[in-house]
Image: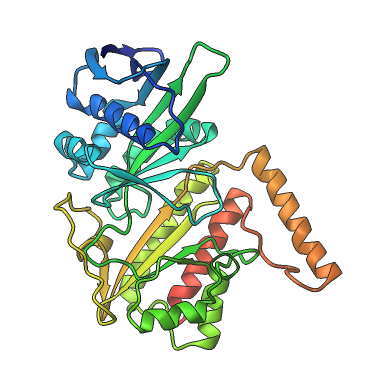
Amino acid sequence: MSKVSTCYYDNQYNHQRIKHELNRIDPNHPKFIQTLQKCIQCTVSEPGIQTQSYEFSFPNEIGIVNFTAYQIQQFNKLKQLQSINHKQIQSIMSQEFHKIRNQGNSESMFYQSKCKFMYIKSLKQNELQNMLTFLTEYMIYMQQHPNTFLPRYLGMYTIKYNPNLETQTKYHFIIMTNWFYSIHQPILKFDLKGSQLNRSRIHQDHYTAIEIWKRVCEGDMVDIVLKENDLMELDLNSDFIFLDFNIQTTLRILNQLKSDINLLQLYRFMDYSFVIGIHFINQGDHRVTIDSSPKDRSEFKKDEGGLRNKDRVYFFGLVDILQEYGVVKKVERGLKRTRSFMGEVLNGTDGGLEVSVEEPVRYGSRLFHYVKNRFCSHI
């Protein structure tokens, strides 16, 4: 049975909406992401046309779904900046997407394309609104700063089940490129916020940072993201050298990071991370075959998607940038600071440690100075 859905342009909200009928599917069900992929394909199948009918065939349809694609023209310009055309989006969206493990503390859902070039990530309502507010400035900034570490966003969507019923369910998603997409797969990954409280993976993955480093030295491919306290353990107990760039490259990286953080501070964003991936060229064969893909304009991705330095390839990027410092984050900050203080008073642990949640200006400055100290420690 075939259901016809109509796509129309809404001048008030400046976005394109697709309506059709299909099953109400749980986000963990494979059919859910397949449905989302088909809807995204619809929005790029006829670029430039604002009103278009689409026809879908789904067995056992029992509910109504509204699909919204936001600010299509602006996201099309962002795709062009990354040399990504509509046919490439169509091709990627026809691939199988896998739900992947979220190694952070957020509740976001992540789906990765089979070719590993693209992610689909769920957003909270406030993150969607923040992106809509940020989008015009973001697009201008991306045009003017080809070397930026900001995420490469390519589209944003809402899928809503049974929109006219009290039981309606809606999900927001954004698609972006993968910072670590390369034939050189990162063997070590670091997620840095510049804080210390609960900033360790050893309690969650049951491996110490030293054990992970030993596995890397033996040629193992580890899929664990390390944080500040893990890095401190490596500094104290191993021969691991984190960053070893010359002063010219160091200054270019730090200047770009400072510029990016200044923009995020202006929009009162916080709780983002600076991620670093490292591929060790002479430690095991971790090269992979990847599909041909658009080349990023950034000078920091010129060496097969990363930045070559001696016997390593580095990958840098900012992630999770759309969290605004609102009431919820203020309460979270207060609770974490209280916990840090009480740890010192009661048993001498965690006392005085920097918490991850901070007001935007202090948050950005703290992260920048942490990364700067890491880069400059050998100079």
Q: Is residue 379 visible?
A: no
Q: Is residue 296 left or right of residue 253?
A: left
Identity of the residue drawn at 47% across and 70% down: 372
Identity of the residue drawn at 44% across and 77% down: 376
Report x, y in % for residue 201: 55, 67
Seen from the viewer's position, the closer of residues 199 and 2 is 2
Report x, y in % for residue 153: 34, 41
Report x, y in % for residue 115: 23, 51
Seen from the viewer's position, the closer of residues 132 and 275 is 275
Q: In the rendered image of this protein, does residue 230 appear above or below residue 338?
A: below
Q: In the rendered image of this protein, does residue 133 appear above or below residue 114?
A: above
- Identify the image quadrant of the C terminus: bottom left
Q: Is residue 191 left or right of residue 117?
A: right
**Residue furthest to the right:** 346
Q: Is residue 346 visible?
A: yes
Report x, y in % for residue 112: 33, 47
- Identify the image quadrant of the N terminus: top left
Identity of the residue drawn at 22% across and 13% down: 52
Q: Is residue 245 left or right of residue 367?
A: left
Seen from the viewer's position, the closer of residues 246 and 5 is 5
